Amino acid sequence: MSIRFLSLIVTSCFGLIINAQNNIPNASTVRDFLINQKIHTERDLEELRISSYHSDAKSGLTYVYWEQMYQGIPVFNALISSAYTKDGKIKVANSNAVTNLSQKVKRIQSHRIAPEAALRAALEHLGIDKPAPSILSKQEKDLVVEFENQNISQEKLLAEKYWFDAGDRLIPVWNIVIQPNGSSDWWNIRIDATNGKFIEKNNWTAECQPAETSDRILSFGFQNIKPVLKSSPKKGALTGATYNVFGLPYESPNHGPRTLITDPHDSMASPYGWHTRNTTNLKEFTITRGNNVHAYEDQANANTPGFSPNGGDSLYFDFPVNFSAPAIQSMPAAVTNLFYMNNIAHDVFYQYGFTEAAGNFQVNNYGRGGIGNDDVRAEAMDGGGTNNANFSTPPDGQRPRMQMYLWPQSSQSSNGLRVDSPIVASYPLVPAAIGPQLSTNPVSGQLVLMNDGSTDPTLGCQSTQQNLQGKIVLIDRGTCAFANKILNAQQAGAIGVIVANNVSGNPIAMGGTGTGINIPAGMTTQGAGNILKQLLSQYPAVYVSLRDSSISFDSSFDNGVVLHEYGHGISIRLTGGASNSNCLNNQEQAGEGWSDLFGLFFTTTSTNTAAQRRGIGTFLIGQNTNGQGIRQAPYSTSTTQNNLTYDNIKTASVPHGVGTVWATMVWEMFWNLVDIHGFDNDLYYGNGGNNIAFRLVMEGLKLQKCNPGFVDSRDAILQADTLLYNGQNSCAIWAAFAKRGLGFSANQGLATSRSDGTQAFDTHPNCLVSVSENTPSKPQPTLYPNPAKDFIFIDLPEFEGRIKVRMIDLTGKVVLNDQIDLQAGNRIFVPLQQYPVGVYVLEVADAFGHQWHSKVTIRR
């Protein structure tokens, strides 16, 4: 929930248009629609309010997100996503509202505990030892309570009043919204308002999945890439801004060289360029800041703006890159690339319906609807960790945050620990993944051995009475969490920590919860630790320096990963409407898959093929461009390269593994549509199959229900095809999902579980007249498009060799009798230009007994 909710509560007693000027539909329209479909009773929908709504000029639709209420209090995530035509007719309503409401409220209790008590319970759950602060204000008829911050949360500290569906009844809850200081997490925590007990929580921050970081490469293989046509946005006000970046369609430094690009902004999405928040001074900022994004480094993990490169009055951003040197030497170029890619994402997504009214990320919305003041805070070289990236998406009107981390390019430690006196020597050091990151600028000081006064004093597991002011502390590994050791040293005044490994072999990157840590730390080998202890026993003073001399890649240079993170903001803002950021937290939601797809959509060109291996994050983990990447399989329509089907989500990791299965399905759809409509290199305004797939995905996000499962998301895409293209692509869409086990007979079970679904490989009956063997548990042949114009594709899983093809008209005449070789992906192509319009029966067979036939309609 956000404080943006419209004050429009409607009961079944009223039948008038709420706001004739804005043509907002009445609640009776969605109520009648869902009652007629026998999804809800009238009592379920007796009290509704509009959470958010917007109209889209390109689709001609108005999207209204209704929230279920009871006694003037909203039910958590009980949203209805609906779409209306210009004449006010409802076309779609996908509901996550509570059913059987009249029974669930029979034993309902009131919100007994105060919001302050709920906040105390949430702080206790998070391990934050601070008293609940005083109330600052109450809003929305006391549904939203804001507290004094008192250095607890980086953002507004809120308590929101809800009902929560506990299955057999509604229970009163407070939803506590908090982003703890020093943490990237942005929690929504449900506390039972009758007893103060924790119920559940979800995170507005979506994390990238860390990967193994061995077998790195430091060379780049883009020299032989064929040149491709690049998208050309419509030019707005020209500022002359020039950026030396890895421009689209290049996914990363592995995929193509940097080039100088001038005025790449789009006239509709960013009419005044990328460096201003107003309409007059086009060079309000000469740094990497503007209306859509503020990009800067955050090595200190302070979550506040650090260094931003300055392009001067000419806005010329050309800075050197050296991937063989420490990442800090390429920092200005990294921030520039991050700024460029965030703006490109903003401008392209705008063309596909992520506009101001839909909840996009802008400071100034130019009077086009939505709530402004929510540009992206894009943080390069973030010091909050390594081998990661994330995106935090609050509701419309609150600023999201993108954090891009460094990815070390070797599993071996670098010699970042230097003894300066009384001898000079260097030893291995792996920087910690928690707390501020070490840089090439050393942290220097006198070394002391930890003594916490316990029976094992060098472990540092207890608070110490030592005076460690200005010292670097050597601590042994073992017994307690790394964060505890570092915090104990920090509280005694230390400026840095070295943890000595307690086993032989390489040290590791210390992880854990880094909340409150503000000094750097690293781990050295067991042998180096013993040498340091010996020096401390022999000399009155030992001085050391800590630095990061390893080679790391900044994920700000990986456009695919930047787009993935930005994509979380898209899917979260669009699912359930811009005022709710809690709709993609169930087990079977496909958020990670949507984000992978966006990275693929932006970086695919006409030179790519369907069966080609496309990995995510290959640059960052040192793989070549055809590597598997950080997912359990590369993306490919070839089942040899990627054999994932719906059943795989039952054992896949949540959410990344689940998302990979979803993206695999939609990637099939993407290429089916490219086969039919061709590929258009114009990403902004094109009309190829790639553009159609992009539009269907974006529209599907707007239409799908809150907390969707795979079947819900599939059906939303099919609904989108009906609304945008009159259903002409439905058989191609069904073919894609059926191939990967989400066919017509598939059942998702509960969207809250990934383990109770049933896969099926059959297509929709309207796409298939009859088959010789129609077993939903096995992959089925599919034909598309149907109706067809000039050609058809037929996918023939389990068929082999040359395929006999016959086509017979309704008089029984055989008009086609030929043999065709199977193409990649067990597909055949049948041209139809020479045949008149009409209905035909098409038969196929191979030499191994596989047979199949279907009706095909030719229309022109």
Image (cartoon, rainbow, N blue to C red):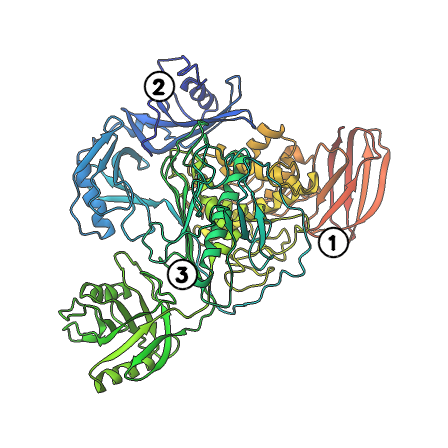
Q: Residue at x 66, y 35 (%)?
A: 767
The extreme bottom residue here reads: 538
Q: Tell me if label 3 and label 2 are in contact, CB under 8 Å.
A: no
Q: Residues within 10 Å of mark 2 (few under 14, many from 20)?
A: many
- Gap between marks 1 and 2, in whole Å? 60 Å
Can residue 749 be seen from the camera position used here? Answer: no
First-in-chain label (3 vs 2) = 2
> Toward the viewer: 149 or 670?
149
For discs 1 and 2, the disc positioned in front in the rendered view? 2
Amino acid at pointer 3: Thr
Q: Quadrant of the N terminus?
A: top left
Can residue 673 be seen from the camera position used here? Answer: yes
Amino acid at pointer 2: Val
Residue 29 image position (x, y, % from top left): 45, 19
First-in-chain label (1 vs 3) = 3
Q: Residues within 10 Å of mark 3 (few under 14, many from 20)?
A: many
Where residue 386 is drawn, which disc sits there?
3
Residue 118 image position (x, y, % from top left): 20, 40
Q: Quadrant of the C terminus?
A: top right
Residue under numbered circle 1: 800
Mark count? 3
> Toward the viewer: 363 or 2?
363
Q: Is residue 155 above or below residue 418?
A: above
Residue under numbered circle 2: 10
Q: Tell me if label 1 and label 3 are in contact, CB under 8 Å.
A: no
In the rendered image, which quarter is residue 157 located in? top left
- Gap between marks 1 and 3, in whole Å? 47 Å
Residue 831 image position (x, y, % from top left): 79, 40
